[in-house]
Amino acid sequence: MTPEQATYRYFKVFVPAQCVYAAGSIGITWVGENSNLSSTVLYTLAFVPIVAIFVTFWAHWRFATEIDEFLQLIQLKGTLFGIACVMVVASGWGTLEMLADAPRLSVFWLLPIFWIAQSVATAFISKREGVF
Amino acid sequence: MIKNHLKPLRGERGWSQSTLGDHLGVSRQTINAIEAGRYDPSLPLAFKISRLFNLPIESIFEDGESHLLPISLNTYPCGKAPIR
C-alpha cells in the first residue's frame, strides 16, 4: 500500500470520528446543562465521544502499520513528542495545582493537546526529512 | 550514518526514486532519505536492496570501516585462533 492510499484510508476514518467526538462532546455538555436526564443516561451518552476517541486511535494505529519503516519512524517521533507534551502539561499543572493552588485544569484538554502537539511535530519532522 | 551507493546504482538502471520504491515496496520519500544519508534502512530492507541489485550488502552500504577481519581474528582479539 502506498503512503497516499494509507493516508486516504486514515482520513476516511479520522475526519468522521473527530466530527462525532466534537459533536458528542458539545452535545452532551449542552444536554447535561439544559435537560433533566438522569446521570445514567448522561454516562451512557458520554460513551459516544469516548468510542470516537478509540476509533481515532485505532485508525492511527492502522495507518502506522500500513506505511513503510521511514514514515513509521516519523510518526513514532511525532507521537512521542505528543505524549511528552501531555505528560509535561499533566504533571506540571498537577504540581502547580497541588503546591501553588493553581486553578483546576480539566483532563478533557489532554487529548486536544496530544493531537495538536503530535500533528505539529509530525509536520515539522516530515518537512525537515524532506517528505514534502 | 552509513554511506551508500544507491543513487548511482539506481541511475545506472534509469529508475526514478518512485520506481525503485515500487520495486522495494517502500515510498519515494524513503528512497530519497536513504540516498541523502538521512536514514539508514533496516536489515530486511538492506537485504531487499542487495537482492534487487544482485550485489552484496557491503558493496552497496559502507560503515566507514575499510576492511573486515576474518571471523577467527575477530573472535580472538590477540590474533591467534586456538590450535585444534
Image (tube, coloured by chain):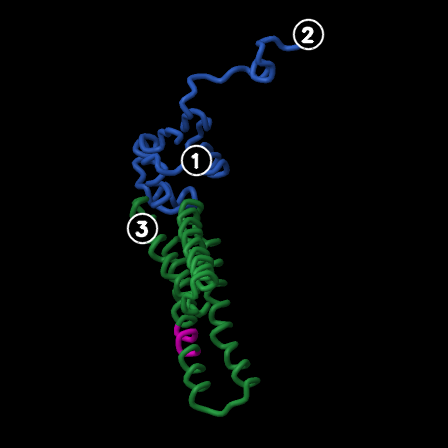
Chain colours: A green, B blue
Q: Which residue is mark 3?
A: A124
Q: Earlier in the sequence, mark 1 or mark 2?
A: 1
Dot 1: chain letter: B
Q: Nearer the viewer, residue A57 or A9?
A: A57
Q: Nearer the viewer, mark 2 or mark 3?
A: 3
Q: Which residue is mark 1?
A: B49
Residue B53: x and y in percent read: 41, 32
Give the side of residue A35 with respect to residue B13, left or right: right
Q: Are marks 2 and 3 on the same chain?
A: no
> Secondary structure beneath disc 2?
loop
Amino acid tagged 3: Phe
Residue B70: x and y in percent read: 55, 15
How far apart marks 3 and 1 lie (CA) works out to 29 Å
Q: Which residue is mark 2?
A: B83
Amino acid tagged 2: Ile
> Secondary structure beneath disc 1?
helix
Q: Is residue B65 above or below residue A80?
A: above
Q: Nearer the viewer, residue A38 or B69?
A: A38
Give the side of residue A38 with respect to residue B52, left or right: right
The segment highlighted magenta reads A19-24
Residue A29: x and y in percent read: 43, 81
